[in-house]
Amino acid sequence: RSVVDALAENPALEAVTINRSRHTISVATLGRTDVPKLTERISATVRRAEEAAGTAGCLLLAGEGDCQTCAQPLSEVELRKITIHSDPETTTISRVTCPTAPKFWRWRDIPWPKVVQRDVEFLEHADEINEWRAQMVAAILCGVCGLGAYLFRAYPVSVLGYLLAYLAGSWFTAQEVWERLQKQAIDVHFLMLAVAVGSASIGAWGEGTTLLFLFSLSGALEHFALGRTQREIRSLFREAPKFATVLDEQGRERETPVEKLRADMRLLLKPGAQFPVDAEIVKGQTASDESNLTGEATPVEKAVGDHVLAGTLNLWGAVEAVVLRPVAESSLQKIIRLIKEAQHQKAPAQQFTDKFGAFYTYLVLGLSLAMFFVWWLGFGLPPFTSTSAGHSAFYRTMTLLVVASPCALVLSIPSAVLAAIAWSARHGILFRGGAAVEKLAAVNTVALDKTGTLTTGELRVEKVE
């Protein structure tokens, strides 16, 4: 649908080919066109299709169906204006034109856009969630090797210890710096590495090792807090059903993955299980436990015409219901999506340090370079070789670089905020990002709903008459 719209809006665009196996997009144009704008339009189209989950997404990108089975089908008028050619790996959507026209098309490749997956569950793999373990091992190795090298600093082997400490402490930071350099950007991570290298260049191995140890330890703690938050949130929704019982027109039951459910499908919802999607009851009565979504433990009576929410528990009655919306648009999914997005929302203090860190990096590097020439040309100090009369201009420059390293500012705020979010998640309190944590410090009055908050939220029999 979006590609067809792009063809209609851009007369110079003739065809779009999507290769699913190689993850490439190719566009054919004829005549002058705004290539950056066209690239952005097509990339955004594919990105939106991939970000959507389940049946809300484009089945074509998953290798299923074709453009004829789109959730937003093309009209007969639109179908007469285009041709669609599909095979197991590629799909080409092009204008209807004369047979010789493709010879004059100019093909361009567009990078496959990076997307943030939004599915029913958190898609972070276990190795990503537990990445903090590798970072913690690297930080500990950096500290142990650095301490050993310091204790045996009188021996030549100490240099080997410092080199191992540098390698372990800078391993993950160097990867981040390389990724940012590829995007033509530097930040405080680059400054930290520059300071460490500068320390080593003037023989201050201990100072450089200490800096790398603190920085790598902070990164490990940051990932640990984030991973723990992911695990706590996943535990809250791990009971979400993966399959649903669908009733066909003859009333026969079949198990269907929740991602395949479409609006108006008829479901059989049995007692004791969670509702897989948002639905409207059309037959039967029951009660639902909505405490995991609303915090209210009192069961809610449900009858014909009432809506039930995905993730809530069907307590006692078998009912039939009609799907209201795909699982990707359910209430449960919206909550999960908000939580995931909130994890990337930074507190004002963090936003300040990020912006300040990038500016500060350029400032310190520029100032250090300027002072090198001042000490060399202005004060007549030797540029690189220290003498008995004093240190060289390079030595003083590296000293300035080490002193200007913003360790406390960069390391403290992210670690504190993420630790607060992780601790809260473990106790069942979900913060929508670091901004909410920071605002909590200014709260003077808190109002609490009694049921399930100040009380246990569980019903029990007190008396039978």
Image (tube, rainbow, N blue to C red):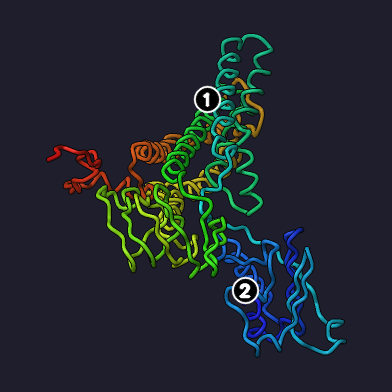
From this viewpoint, is residue 194 visible? no
**How many neighbours does mark 1 have within 10 angstroms: few (below 14), some (14-19), or many (20 or more)?**
some
Q: What's under tag 2, amino acid-wise?
A: Cys
Q: Quadrant of the C terminus?
A: top left
Q: Position of residue 211 (x, y in %)?
A: 52, 29
Q: Position of residue 346 (x, y in %)?
A: 41, 49
What residue is pinned by disc 1? 210
Depth check: 294 or 232 in front?
A: 294
Measured along the vertical axis of the image, is residue 64 above or below residue 127? below
Depth check: 54 or 262 in front?
A: 262
Mark before the other along the chain sequence, 2 or 1: 2
User: In the visual, does 347 lie left or right of 370?
Assistant: left
Measured along the vertical axis of the image, is residue 84 above or below residue 109? below
Q: Residue at x 52, y 25 (%)?
A: 210
What residue is pinned by disc 2? 70
Residue 155 in which image quadrant: top right
Which secondary structure, mark 2?
loop
Which secondary structure, mark 1?
helix
Depth check: 412 or 378 in front?
A: 412
